[in-house]
Image: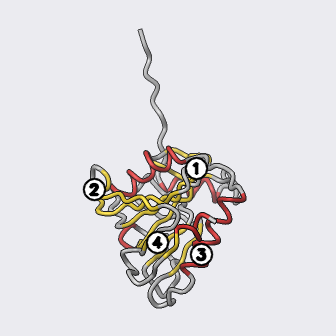
Amino acid sequence: MSVQMQRRLFTVQEYHLMNEAGILGEDDRVELIEGEIIQMAAIGTRHASCVKRLLRQFNIIPDDQAIIGVQDPIQLTERTEPQPDVVLLQPRADYYATAHPVPSEVLLLVEVSDSTVDYDRDVKVSIYARSLIQEVWLVDLVENCLEVYRQPGPNGYSLMLKFWRGQQVAPLAFPDLEVSVDFILG
């Protein structure tokens, strides 16, 4: 006879209460994915450099057109609050002081992946699609390419484009902002 174990899934509210109670600390690198608290991988130097390069590219966007978030939470559902590497958000007067961003406020979401490429692609990108995030970039530091996901739906993104060194791409929300894949990858 096999026994099926039940998992105890957490809500975003419970997750936040754990932080307030000191169960999770400020230095804990975790995120809530579909009710489970997931340990995030350590940030290596190439990963950190890539995030800095993305920030350099996106910093030219005027403040009244986007707010840039770096490894900040986004509440996707009652049970999912990831911390993507970079997001471009719709401007809000309070700079998101009263609530974390929700999917409709995300203009572009970027995950930088080295040791977690498969997880980011198979799990997180699927969740972003179901949440209707309009555009996701996955910087694959293993294959040295940029995967661009567009046209979200309940079964994933219906459009995935791959960009390699020597190519440029512009976010849907900022079509005049040409970003060099060479520069992103370093």
Which secondary structure lies at badge 1?
loop
Q: Is residue 56 above or below residue 44?
A: below
Percent from the top left, x then y, of residue 42? 69, 51
Q: Which residue occupies 46% across, 25% down?
A: 5
Residue behind mark 1: 142
Q: Earlier in the sequence, mark 4 or mark 3?
A: 3
Residue 55 is marked as 3
The kind of residue tagged 3 is Leu
Question: CB under 8 Å between callouts 1 and 2?
Answer: no
Of label 4 and label 1, which has the lower sequence position?
1
Q: Residue at x 46, y 79 (%)?
A: 178
Numbered circle sitting on residue 158 = 2
* Residue contact between numbered discs 4 and 2, judged by CB atoms under 8 Å: no
- Secondary element at image label 3: helix
Residue wearing tag 4: 168
Residue 151 is left or right of residue 120, and the answer is left
Amino acid type assigned to the residue bearing label 2 in the image: Ser
- Which quadrant is the N terminus positioned in? top left
What amino acid is found at the position of numbered circle 4 in the picture? Answer: Gln
Give the quadrant of the C terminus: bottom right
Q: Quadrant of residue 58?
A: bottom right
Give the CA separation, mark 3 to mark 1: 21 Å
33 over 106 or under it: above or below: above
Q: Residues within 10 Å of mark 4 (few under 14, many from 20)?
A: some
Identify which residue is drawn at 46% across, 63% down: 137
